Image (tube, grey):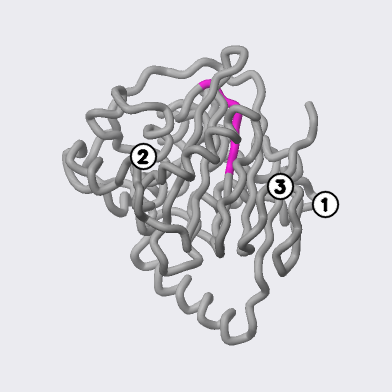
Amino acid sequence: MPKLALTRHLTALGAAGCLLLAIGANAADAATAGVVPPRNPAGDCNAGGGGGLAAINSCRAAEGVGPLILPRNFSSLTPVQQGFVVINLERVNRGLPAIVGLSAPLNSLAAAGASAGADPNFPAGGVSGGGIWAGAYSVLQADYLWMYVDGPGGNNLDCTSGNSAGCWGHRDIILWDRSSAPLVSGGGFATAGGTDSLAYLVLSGYSASNLAFTWAGELRYFSSKPGVEPLGKTTRAQHHKKTKRRRHHRTQATVTSSSSSSSSSSSSSSGPSITVG
């Protein structure tokens, strides 16, 4: 299997910025469930079961997060919309703000990434955030791989004992929370050889106009508005068709704070460049 790259370009924080980041993280802990950046899980979950809803809920329980409650229209959504909903539930169930919607232009970039089996290119302009890609048997399996087996011993090819900085990069993009600006996403989906190819952008500093699908519009399909989902809350996850057993997994992601980065090999922005898988 070829080694694929996840590149992160992050601007350095001064002492004052570090202090503010630490204060923000401590204040957020009281209103969150589970593990949120800058913290990471202690290790991979490896719940098995093909990485479907049961595996996700098992891993969420181990993290102190209640089950994933899917909207009643989930089966009628497109794969791109399904992935957006699941990513947002991973966020809001941990107390992070929801991504406001899927942008039509960003969907086009993500679709090209999904078709190429690679991380999506970035739009022009000063944006921050990242892009992720996975080959999986379903949207739910992709979420399981990105969120719960992205650390040591999982499927993150460059997350090794000699390169621990490469661990949990995909999860950190899904749970991106480094800006007060609204987050906007783009999603792409393709199929090849019986495997789904899914790519997403999660960006701040990008226009929230021309949205093709919104979180606000989807909320009416939940029995109650999704929020922090601590373990033990009296809700039950909806049943979902069990996914096939995973045969292989490849992931790729890019984070940038530059206006011109467009691929995993780009190094045009300031700060350290960390390559993981």
Look at the numbered discs 2 and 3 and tell me whether their residues touch, using CB distance below 8 Å: no
* Residue 53 visible within the image: yes
What amino acid type is highlighted by mark number 3? Ser
Q: CA distance from mark 1 to mark 3?
A: 21 Å
Mark 3 Cα within 10 Å, few/some/many (few <14, many 20+)? many
The residue drawn where x is 57% and y is 81% is 17
For residue 224, side relative to residue 24 (left or right): left
Secondary structure state at the residue bearing disc 1 = loop
Residue tagged 3: 264
Secondary structure state at the residue bearing disc 2 = helix
- The disc at residue 162 is 1
> Nearest the camera: 87 or 257?
257
> Nearest the camera: 48 or 264?
264
From the viewer's perspective, is the residue at label 2 or at label 1 nearer?
2
What amino acid type is highlighted by mark number 2? Val
Mark 1 Cα within 10 Å, few/some/many (few <14, many 20+)? few
Residue 134 position (above or below residue 240):
below
Residue tagged 2: 85
Secondary structure state at the residue bearing disc 3 = loop
